[in-house]
Image: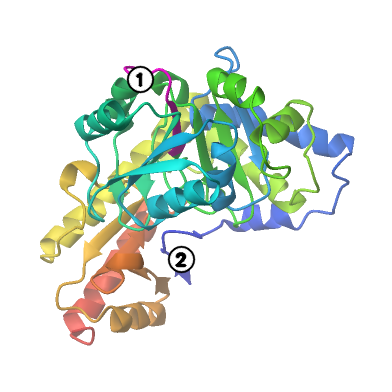
Amino acid sequence: MKLWIPGPTEVRPALLAECARPMIGHRSDAMAKLHDRIDPHLRLAFGASAESGSAVAVHTCSATGLMESSLHGTGKRVLCVVNGSFSKRWAEIAQILGFETVTLKKAFGEAASPEEIDRALTEKGPFDALTLISNETSTGVRTPLTGVAAVLRKHPGTLWLVDVVSYLAGMPIDFDAHGIDFAFAGSQKALALPPGITVFAASKRYLERVRAAKRPSFYLDPVRVIDGHVERKTPATPCIPLYFALAQQLEDISNGVTLPERDRALRGAAAWSARYAKHERMYRTTEAWATRHGFEYIPAPEHRSWTVSCVKKGPLDVAKLLAELKKRGHTISNGYGDLKDISFRIGHMGDHSEADLANLLAATDEVLASGVAQ
């Protein structure tokens, strides 16, 4: 069965085998060496260099845990861009933590423009932090980072916190170049690993502010996690099997192992760029397929994700479509949250090949032609 939902995603057998390695102690030299293997490739994934003062780290929790972690010590007022189920969750977390939380709300399926974000920061500010989901998995909406980066340069007192959960390893983040202050992702999306750990990057100025502030958390204290990573340690017992798999996957991506055969000689940043290009091609292929069948996307063309397509179902019975595809060896997803009953989603992310995608779309064509999903 091929898994095409927007996470967890298909995991290669070689990575599952890494999870089955003999156990090691989490304070051992072997564990410290895992940190050493992970760090340089994780910096490539985020675009976060040591020279800039940016830090990267790994933590054992869900990405929702890092939504909370990212806010600790940032200040008192936060502007949350809410345009989907997960951005709504982040705003709820800010409220629970006691932040004065202002929301910039957009319809689910739309992105906030840089101009709208600038206006909210100017007219309702000042704010200590801005939260933004770069790629709303619930709606398939991608918010281009470049325009927002230009806005944040006009508001230097506002830390920029970005959820890149279904963005990392599928689209370029350019953490340092964009001036992002905190970005995080889970292992189960475009990194194509089992769920259970998270990765994140933090800027020098983020660390300076948060380190000087009161942080009402132990396990989700970002400074504690980062300091531990620098010392090649973790604040508590981590999910060691996923550290093995993460180290191997990051090395494989950097060494071209996961690329189409024509690109497998690429290394380092070039290999990561080729991985992003593959994700864009898979999105374009899915978009062309949807257009050919008369389906409409939820997001506008300029805001469509490279990793997950959220498509209006039209006259389709999505439950029947999903059931018929399972008979043919493929699993896609229905909509999520407010869009659950009007859409379906295809997660074309991770280590899937373009040939795999062609097989999925051919199977879907077969179901549509049969009329059983009407």
Q: Position of residue 129 (x, y in %)?
A: 44, 31
Q: Position of residue 24 (x, y in %)?
A: 86, 48
Residues in magenta?
Answer: 153-162
- Quick one: SS at disc 2? strand
- The mark lying in front, picked from 2 and 1, is 1
Which image quadrant for residue 229? top right
Lateral position of residue 367 relative to residue 271, left or right: left
Which image quadrant for residue 138? bottom left
Identify which residue, 217 or 49, lies in the foreground. Answer: 217
Reply above or below: 74 against 354.
above
Count neighbours of disc 2 (C-alpha within 10 A) and say few if under 14, some if 14 to 19, many if 20 or more: many
Reply above or below: 300 against 296.
above
The quarter of the picture where the C terminus appears is bottom left
Count neighbours of disc 1 (C-alpha within 10 A) and say few if under 14, some if 14 to 19, many if 20 or more: some
User: What colouring method underlies this structural image?
Assistant: rainbow
Q: Main secondary structure of the magenta part?
A: loop
Label 2 sits on residue = 3
Question: Is residue 155 located in the magenta-colored stretch of the structure?
Answer: yes
Q: Position of residue 14 (x, y in %)?
A: 64, 53
Residue lying furthest bottom in this view?
A: 372
Label 1 sits on residue = 155
